[in-house]
């Protein structure tokens, strides 16, 4: 491992919260592996921002609906970066339950991307993480895991599964690798939420505003760099929404 910089892999790292985490961790001294699926152009732009900070950036494309994607991604990290210090499970899909009828396909996709793929990535990365001087896993959860929304049952249940697997892997990987989560409230609205919907949701937040990708990324940085005596914990970054 010599004196090379620590390496983090960020799934869905090309855009939005993932891209903010990539920039924040580059500022913190990490070299970055950006995983993406559809956002090729954004992945190149985010990689260029990291390189402008004099850090290394690699890009790996994979559809996390493919069952062999997690092992392929970790093999890429091993061969190209040669080490993995922090795995960040950020990729996600957020969709309402289809109206009218139960859809097994919808539930399958939600669980595959939001819970199964993160679990498979953690398993595939175990050897690399155990070999790191300060190995860590950070899972991007959601405050809706505890207080579900009625029309997003599959999404909320999949994030609740992610919270639970954060705790089980924290136990399994202790004491060498710390496994924690960050649960945003409103960081960046989905593009299809209209103004009225946004106003209604912000009105329920004690801090009376939406958050930002940068505020989530700052919390991820704290966990990646300073969580010396924390494992199995989920930090909420939600302007107080979860206590209101
Ligand atoms: N935004 C918020 O306010 C908020 C609130 C609560 C929790 N969170 C959590 O914070 C994290 C980041 O939020 P976000 O809003 O930035 O996420 P997002 O934009 O909804 O999704 C992040 C990335 O996930 C990747 N992804 C989706 N389906 C994939 C697939 N089949 N294979 C591989 N990658 C796939 C996409 O990569 P490509 O674009 O490359 O396809 C996408 O850019 C998520 O885990 C989310 O659940 C966010």
Image (cartoon, helix red, strand yellow):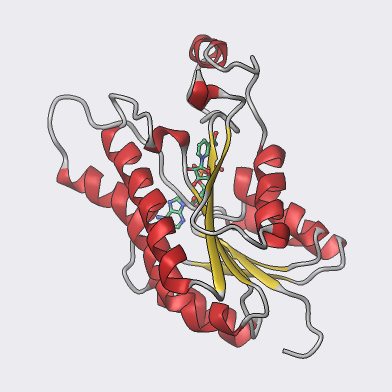
Residue 92 location (% of width, % of height): 45, 48
What residue lies at 47% left-to-right and 73% top-to-bottom? 173
Q: Residue at x 29, y 25 (%)?
A: 151
Residue 81: x %, y % from top left: 66, 81
In-front residue for pair 98/114: 114
Where residue 185 sits in the image (x, y, percent)? 53, 31
Q: Identify which residue is drawn at 28% across, 24% down.
A: 150
- Toward the bottom, the furthest residue is 2
Rendered view: 73 above or below 223: below
Image mark count: 0
The answer to whether 157 appears left or right of 192 in the picture is left
Which of 133 and 89 lies nearest the eye of the viewer?
A: 133
Q: Position of residue 115 (x, y in %)?
A: 36, 55
222 relative to 126 in the view: left or right: right
Q: Nearer the viewer, residue 189 or 169?
A: 169
Q: Quadrant of the N terminus?
A: bottom right
Residue depicted at x 67% and y 63%: 228
* Residue 15 visible in image: no
Q: For this view, does 50 lie left or right of residue 182?
A: right
Judged left or right of residue 181, residue 133 is right
**Image height check: is 3 above or below 104?**
below
Residue 39 shows in the view: yes
Is residue 178 or residue 38 the one in the foreground? 178
């Amino acid at each position: 491992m010599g004196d090379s910089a620590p390496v983090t892999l960020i799934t869905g790292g090309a855009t939005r919260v993932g891209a903010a985490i990539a920039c924040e961790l580059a500022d913190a001294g990490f070299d970055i592996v950006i995983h993406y699926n559809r956002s090729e152009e954004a992945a190149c732009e985010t990689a260029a921002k990291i390189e402008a900070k004099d850090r290394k950036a690699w890009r790996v494309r994979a559809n996390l609906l493919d069952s062999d994607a997690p092992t392929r991604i970790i093999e890429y990290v091993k061969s190209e970066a040669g080490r993995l210090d922090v795995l960040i499970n950020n990729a996600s899909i957020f969709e309402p339950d289809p109206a009218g009828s139960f859809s097994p396909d919808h539930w399958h996709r939600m669980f595959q991307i939001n819970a199964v793929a993160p679990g498979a990535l953690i398993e595939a990365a175990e050897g690399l993480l155990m070999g790191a001087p300060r190995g860590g896993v950070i899972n991007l959860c959601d405050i809706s895991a505890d207080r579900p929304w009625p029309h997003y049952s599959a999404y909320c249940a999949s994030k609740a599964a992610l919270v639970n697997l954060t705790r089980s892997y924290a136990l399994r990987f202790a004491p060498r690798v710390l496994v924690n989560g960050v649960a945003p409230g409103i960081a960046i609205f989905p593009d299809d939420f209209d103004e009225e919907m946004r106003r209604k949701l912000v009105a329920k937040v004690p801090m009376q505003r939406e958050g930002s990708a940068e505020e989530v990324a700052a919390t991820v940085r704290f966990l990646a760099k300073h969580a010396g005596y924390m494992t199995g914990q989920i930090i909420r970054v939600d302007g107080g929404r979860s206590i209101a």
